[in-house]
Image (spheres, rainbow, N blue to C red):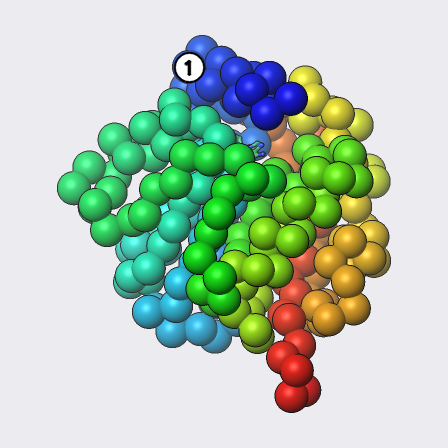
Amino acid sequence: MVMKSKSHWENVYSTKSAEHVGWYKPYLHTSLAMIANTAVGTNARIIDVGGGASTLVDDLLGQGYEQITILDLSSAALSVARSRLGAAAAKVKWIEDDIRAVQLPPAHYDIWHDRAVFHFLTKADDRQQYIENMQRSLKGDGHVIIAAFSPEAPPKCSGLDVQRYTPELLQNELGENFALQEHKSELHLTPGGVEQMYVYCRFRRQSDTD
Ligand SMILES: C[S@@+](CC[C@H](N)C(=O)[O-])C[C@H]1O[C@@H](n2cnc3c(N)ncnc32)[C@H](O)[C@@H]1O
């Protein structure tokens, strides 16, 4: 299952340029705004799970963030991002692995960011592994930003089935110790002209003392 998924993504990034994949955006404005709204400092540890070849890392480096990790299943996607960044790529930690299975350091990250990855997990077991990994590696009062297809979006992304979310449905997946801080709907137009409505949600884990 993991291998099938990996070969799908390696094929996508090996056959299309990063600007021609359906989810491409030159700037992830809403992600950047939500990261800014967490008010963490530039020394905060940020992980972009399923970051692929996205430009988020370029803009975070440009804003002075110093501890960025990009994790993705696809080595082809990570190579695109690394080559684009050139020497600056050395400032980033790159992890090629599956978010359901990877061993991340415990209580480590201030921000967990995911745009268009969690929504591919259509099986409850896969979602549970993802959420357990997120809970383990996030700091006690860490932030979670997830962007997923909303119910108005098509039922498939990159030819794969997706689970579509409202803020309430995402809240149910994360559990009640994550408090929703803000959410925003955003219409994305793919390079091929297909409309996809996303919902972006920012949560904060409530530490035991809250
Ligand atoms: C739709 S793309 C979104 C990429 C990026 N977040 C963006 O917004 O441009 C989904 C990404 O998730 C990665 N991915 C899919 N399943 C994954 C998994 N189980 N673990 C890690 N990465 C995964 C893919 O390789 C791909 O880069």
Mark 1 — residue? 14
* Residue nearest the viewer, comparing 22 with 111: 111
Quarter-wise, where is residue 30 in the image?
bottom right
Q: What number of labels is visible? A: 1
**Whether residue 128 is situated above or below residue 24 in the rendered picture:** below
Badge 1 density bin: few <14, some 14–19, many ≥20, Cα 10 Å: some
**Whether residue 52 is situated above or below residue 31 in the rendered picture:** above
Quarter-wise, where is residue 94 in the image?
top left
Residue 34 coordinates in the image, percent (x, y)? 55, 62
Residue 28 coordinates in the image, percent (x, y)? 49, 47
Residue shown at 49% from the left, 14% from the top: 11
Quarter-wise, where is residue 76 in the image?
top left
Residue shown at 78% from the left, 53% from the top: 173
Location of the C terminus (image quadrant): bottom right
Using the rendered image of the protein, determine whether residue 153 is visible from the camera's viewpoint: no
Location of the N terminus (image quadrant): top right
Q: Does the residue labelled 1 lie within 8 Å of ligand 1?
A: no
Query: Where is ligand 1, by quadrant?
Result: top right
Helix, strand or loop under label 1: helix
* Residue nearest the viewer, comparing 142 with 42: 142
Q: In this view, does 37 lie to the left or right of 174?
A: left
Residue 124 coordinates in the image, percent (x, y)? 79, 40
Residue shown at 70% from the left, 68% from the top: 178
**Whether residue 118 is situated above or below residue 76 in the rendered picture:** below
Q: Name the amino acid, label 1.
A: Ser
Using the rendered image of the protein, determine whether residue 1 is visible from the camera's viewpoint: yes
Q: Is residue 88 left or right of residue 142?
A: left
Residue shown at 56% from the left, 39% from the top: 101
Toward the bottom, the furthest residue is 209
Q: In this view, does 94 lie to the left or right of 133?
A: left
